Image: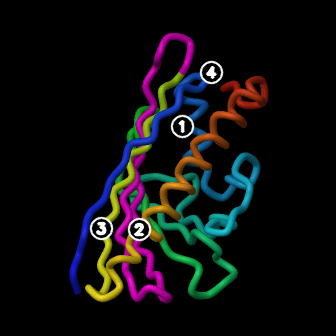
Amino acid sequence: MPVSHWHKLYTVDIQAPPGVVFGLIVDLPNYGRWLPGSASYESTTDVEPYPIRLGSRYHDGKPTEPGKDWWGEVVGFQPPGSVDFHQAIYARQLRATVDTHIHYSFEPAGDRTRVTRWLVLTIGMPLLLRPLRRLIISAFDKENVRTMAALAEYAEAHPNELAPD
């Protein structure tokens, strides 16, 4: 099956310390407090071990809907500076497999935190369906933009709730 690659960086500056923003990203089963559901994402469940660490696995997407769910793994963990996730997603309608790598970095930027999310997709799909690859990329792009905006909005709206003890 032919394979193609695509990647994009998403960056946002958030008025919160790096450890606070990192804490939101690694608290997988509680994404619902800051990330509303969408057509692609409902929740993250079955996180083992939790709190997450290198090697933690999780059930993502729409875990209650077979075929719209996938499993992921934490493949890099450097608190509070970075975290990496890997997921293999099968898009049945397009007969495509999307190998997904997400790298987050959290860097101080004055009194803000610069959050960078690097999304790397390796898409395997039949050559005949390859023109539909843009649908996959568009869906991922939309979800990444939405996630970064929701993260910034929540972290900035709840500074006292998120302050470290």
Q: What residue type is labelled 3?
A: Thr
Locate residue 20: give its quadrant: top right
On the image, numbered disc 1 is attached to which residue? 22
Q: Is residue 97 magenta?
A: yes
SS majority, magenta:
strand
N-terminal-most mark, 4 or 1: 4
Q: Which of marks 3 and 2 is in front?
A: 2
Q: Which amino acid does label 1 sit on?
A: Phe
On the image, numbered disc 2 is attached to which residue? 134
On the image, numbered disc 4 is attached to which residue? 15
Disc 4 and disc 1: Cα gap in Å? Answer: 13 Å
Residue 69: x and y, percent?
A: 57, 78
Give the class, few, some or many, for how many residues have Cα within 10 Å of label 2's Cα (few <14, many ≥20): few
Q: What residue type is labelled 4?
A: Gln
Residue 145: x and y, percent?
A: 55, 47
Disc 3 and disc 2: Cα gap in Å? Answer: 13 Å
Residue 165: x and y, percent?
A: 69, 25
Say if mark 4 contacts mark 2, CB within 8 Å. no
Please give the range of residues in magenta. Answer: 83-112
Give the class, few, some or many, for how many residues have Cα within 10 Å of label 1's Cα (few <14, many ≥20): many
On the image, numbered disc 3 is attached to which residue? 122
Q: Which amino acid does label 2 sit on?
A: Arg
Say if mark 3 contacts mark 2, CB within 8 Å. no
